[in-house]
Amino acid sequence: MEPQVGSILEGKVTSIMKFGAFVALEGGGSGLVHISEIANTFVEDVHDFLQTGQTVKVLVLSAENGRVNLSIKKALPREERRPARPMPAARPASRPAQHPPANRGKPAPLPPSGDQAFEDKLKQFLSSSEGKMADLNRSMDGKRGGRRRR
C-alpha cells in the first residue's frame, strides 16, 4: 500500500546517491529524498547531512506507480524551517556599479531608482533590448555579405 501524500513518517536511510537518499519507510516500502529536499541550505554532498542507517522523519510529497517522493526539510517543524529571504535593497543612484557594462562608446544608463514603477523599468529594458538587437543585426549583415544587390 502506498503511503498517504502529506503524511509524516519515520524511516531509515538505506542508501545514499549523488542525487539524494533512499529511505525505507516504517510501514514497508521505500522512497527517495531528492538532494533538494534534504536541508534548507545548499546541499553539495548528501553525506554531509545523512548517513546510512540514520533514522529520519520525512513528509510524503507524492506516491504514484510505486514511486514515493519524500522531503526531510518539509517535515521539520515551522520554527526550524528557514524564514523567507528578504528582498535586497535597491542600490543608491549615487553609488556607481561595481562592474559597468560594456556599452561600446554609448553613455552608461543610470541605475533605476527604488521608486521607479515596474512599467517604466520594462519600457527601459525593451528599448535597450531593441537597440542591442538592431546593432547585432547590423553587424551580422556585414558578415553575411551586406545587403543584396539587384
Image (spheres, rainbow, N blue to C red):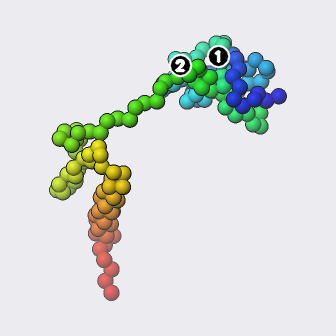
Q: Is residue 27 left or right of residue 141?
A: right
Residue appearing at x 35%, y 35% in the figure: 88
According to the picture, the residue beneath numbered tag 1 turns out to be 56
* Amino acid type, label 2: Glu
Which quarter of the image is occupied by the C terminus? Answer: bottom left
Q: Please tell me which of labels 1 and 2 falls first in the chain.
A: 1
The crowding category of the residue bearing disc 1, from other C-alpha atoms within 10 Å (few below 14, some 14 to 19, many at least 20), is some
SS assignment at label 1? strand
* Amino acid type, label 1: Val
Residue appearing at x 23%, y 39% in the figure: 92
Percent position (x, y) of residue 35? 57, 28
Percent position (x, y) of residue 39? 54, 23
The image quarter in which residue 6 lies = top right
- Nearest the viewer among 56 and 48 is 56
Residue 98, above or below 54:
below
Q: Is residue 26 visible?
A: yes
| Residue 79, label in figure | 2
Residue appearing at x 79%, y 29% in the figure: 2
